[in-house]
Amino acid sequence: MVSQTEPAEDKLVALASIAAELHSVMGVAWSVSLAGKNAKVISAQAGDKGLGFKPITESIDEISQQAIRGVDEISNEALHLSKIAVNEQRSIDAYRRFHLIMKKDGGAKYIKSLSAGLQNVEDNMRASMREFKKSMNHLTLLLETMDQCMLSARAIASVSRIVTSSGQEYRDKLKVVADDLDKAASYIKQRLLNSYQHLSNVNVLTHKSI
């Protein structure tokens, strides 16, 4: 049976908070992408002396593109989940009202004729809940994938420092890129942690609504 609590608004606020976290992440991801492209230019300008930097700069550019794609996917899924949350709550409300009518007027002459309608409403509610759970799991997977991407970014930043420390020309510029990548990855990881927390809140609110 559905309780009298109204978690819909809180769930939507939590999902909106994820969108806000990702909005700031996208800006950082684009800045890392620009830094990666600048690093490739620096490496190219170094000629033969910059050959040792080329794999690193290409890795920085690749990881930044992965980050942009990842943030875009997460944003789309969060939006999709928000729409599902609204539909889910509508189906829960419909079931609640139908159930209350059946309970209140249980002795009415034709009340049993509504049983099929109640079953249909309940089936719709359960289907909405399954769709919500599926989208929740997908969003969680996307966040986990993005988290792994950031671990790779920090590893690349560490390797970059090792490579640039043994170089001569351009190493200062490339070290700045490596430091920026590390800072960006740390920032994005924190935003991901916040998103995990918001998603956890959505999950708690979902259980409370049943």
Image (cartoon, rainbow, N blue to C red):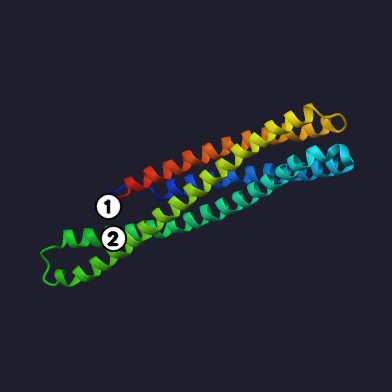
Of helix, strand and loop, which one carries label 1? loop
Q: Nearer the viewer, residue 71 or 106?
A: 71
Q: How many marks?
A: 2
Classify residue 39 as left or right of residue 96.
Answer: right
Q: Inspect the image, locate mark 2, and give the three-letter code of the amino acid beneath it.
A: Tyr
Classify residue 185 as left or right of residue 161.
Answer: left
Q: Which residue is mark 2?
A: 95
Residue 58, position as x, y percentages in the image: 74, 45
- Image position of 21 with respect to 165: above or below: below
Contact, mark 2 vs mark 1 (Cβ under 8 Å): yes
Residue 197, position as x, y percentages in the image: 47, 38
Q: Inspect the image, locate mark 1, and give the three-letter code of the amino acid beneath it.
A: Val
- Image position of 6 with respect to 154: above or below: below
In 3D space, how far apart are the residues under numbered discs 2 and 1 (Cα atoms)?
8 Å
Q: Which residue is mark 1?
A: 2
The answer to which of marks 2 and 1 sits earlier in the sequence is 1
Q: Quadrant of residue 28?
A: top right
Q: Residues within 10 Å of mark 2 (few under 14, many from 20)?
A: many
Residue 16 shows which numbered tag? none
Residue 137, position as x, y percentages in the image: 43, 51
